[in-house]
Image: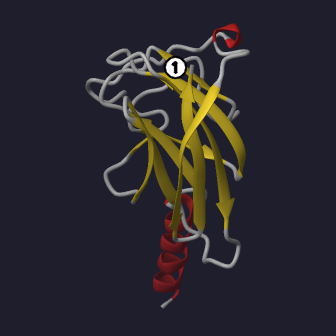
Amino acid sequence: MKKLGLSLILLALLLVSCSPEYGVYQAYTWTDLPNLFSDSNPYTPTPAIYRDEYFKVLPGNYEMVYRIPTNWITWYLRYTIYEDDSYIKKSNYFMIGLYDSGPTISHHTARGMKSLGSAPAEGSSQGILVRPEEIEGKVRIPVGVETKTMEGITVSMEYGRIE
């Protein structure tokens, strides 16, 4: 009986030590690699981001800019991550799509997703950091607003073009 009790305690400790860290995880995805990229989110990996690679973030207000070379439109977005403390703590994953037609938000489950520190996804590549002088003083033309509520978090963004 003592061996069974000790085995159960060891198993419980092992499961706790192997469980993932709860939190909010963000990734970027794209069809064509952005040739201009900047994100005010201090948790975004630098100097490179990889497509579909998740990194842990905290709730807050962030702003980013990107450009896809297929149409040379520069997009801006202001996004806010809200965490609902009333939910049972679990990890939440969301992705911001950087497309030539504008950004999108999507929700993902942890199953099968890459996390920071894993090898880059095939076809992914380094993003290029934007120089602030490239967008300072340019006109921002609002295009849309998008909000996604997932289990425990809400991500909202307003976005548009920079001309």
What color scheme is it? secondary structure
Name the residue at 52% across, 19% down.
Answer: 48
Dot 1: what SS?
loop
Total residue callouts: 1
Query: Residue 78: x and y, percent?
Result: 64, 41
Quadrant in which residue 69 is drawn: top left
Query: Residue 37: x and y, percent?
Result: 54, 21
Quadrant in which residue 79 is drawn: top right
Left or right, 63 with respect to 97, comes to right
For the C terminus, give its image quadrant. Answer: top right
Q: Is residue 62 above or below residue 127?
A: below
Query: Residue 9: x and y, percent?
Result: 55, 76
Name the residue at 61% across, 71% down.
Answer: 89
Name the residue at 60% across, 14% down.
Answer: 130
Regarding residue 67, the answer to whether it shows in the image is: yes
Query: Residue 90: x and y, percent?
Result: 55, 67
Left or right, 99 with respect to 19, comes to left
Q: Is residue 75 above or below residue 53?
A: above
Residue nearest the viewer, comparing 134 with 32: 134
Residue nearest the viewer, comparing 37 with 48: 37
Q: Is residue 2 above or below residue 114?
A: below
Regarding residue 22, the answer to whether it shows in the image is: no
Left or right, 112 with respect to 152, comes to left
Mark 1 crowdedness (10 Å alpha carbons): few <14, some 14-19, many ≥20: few
Residue nearest the viewer, comparing 139 with 150: 139
Name the residue at 48% across, 55% down.
Answer: 93
Identify the residue position indicated by label 1 in the image. Answer: 48
Residue furthest left as drawn: 122
Q: Is residue 37 above or below residue 9?
A: above
The amino acid pointed to by label 1 is Ala
Left or right, 104 with respect to 6, comes to left
